[in-house]
Amino acid sequence: MALLKIAQVGHPVLRTMTEEVGPEELASEPIQRFIDDMVETMRDANGAGLAANQVYVSKRICIMEVGNNPRYPYKPKIPLTILVNPKLTPVDDATFSNFEGCLSVPNMRGRVERYAHIRVQAQNRYGEPLDFEVKGITAGTYQHEVDHLDAKMFLDRVTDPNTFCTWNEFQKYFEAEFREEVADVVAKWGS
Ligand code: NI
């Protein structure tokens, strides 16, 4: 396995729509090895997720995992999840305010509105169909990663520029309030 280089905001690969992965390509050794490399890279960088185009591969693959993450100590856990050709659909109009950061946007966070309940249709790494729903903070993580595949970044969705902050300033001025909001979201949506 290998650690991959992470594209930083401003690189065109982050602003290019990704391509669907066909069944033969998905089963191929290079793509399977690439998925393993994505997992290793995400874990090494303490990311909550990673999209293929963040490591310069313009394919519709993204991954997520939240354990005891020092970057996101308040985030509910997510088991390792690999989505190929994902499609997200909001189940209803309910939203919540999320504070997001991104491995491609160094030392910057901001407030983003996310759907609280979404349907996920995708394939797993073996090409098997997935169809399930996710809610709450975890649903926000899914939307952040699939946004990458659609050439969008959380920066585009920050409606109040006053919420842009570095990680240090987040801890000083925003984290206490946001932790209370996370507790409310988890109480309401279960994750
Ligand atoms: Ni990101």
Image: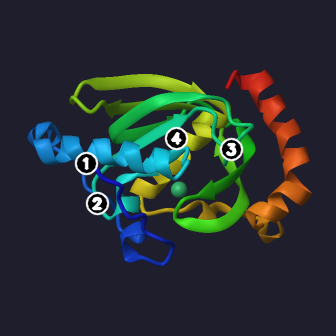
Which amino acid, mark 3?
Tyr
Q: Do the residues labelled 1 and 2 touch (CB within 8 Å)?
A: yes
Mark 1 against mark 4, which lies toward the viewer? Answer: 1
Which amino acid, mark 1?
Phe
| Between discs 4 and 2, the one toward the N terminus | 2
Residue 76 in the figure: left or right of residue 24? right
Give the spatial CA distance, label 4 vs label 3. 15 Å
Q: Which mark is residue 34?
A: 1
Q: Which mark is residue 72?
A: 3
Give the spatial CA distance, label 3 vs label 1. 25 Å
Give the spatial CA distance, label 1 vs label 2. 9 Å
Task: Report whether residue 110 is seen.
Answer: yes
| Between discs 2 and 3, the one toward the N terminus | 2
Which amino acid, mark 2?
Val
Give the spatial CA distance, label 4 vs label 2. 19 Å
Q: Is mark 1 within 8 Å of ligand 1?
A: no
Q: Name the residue under label 4.
A: 142
Which amino acid, mark 4?
Tyr
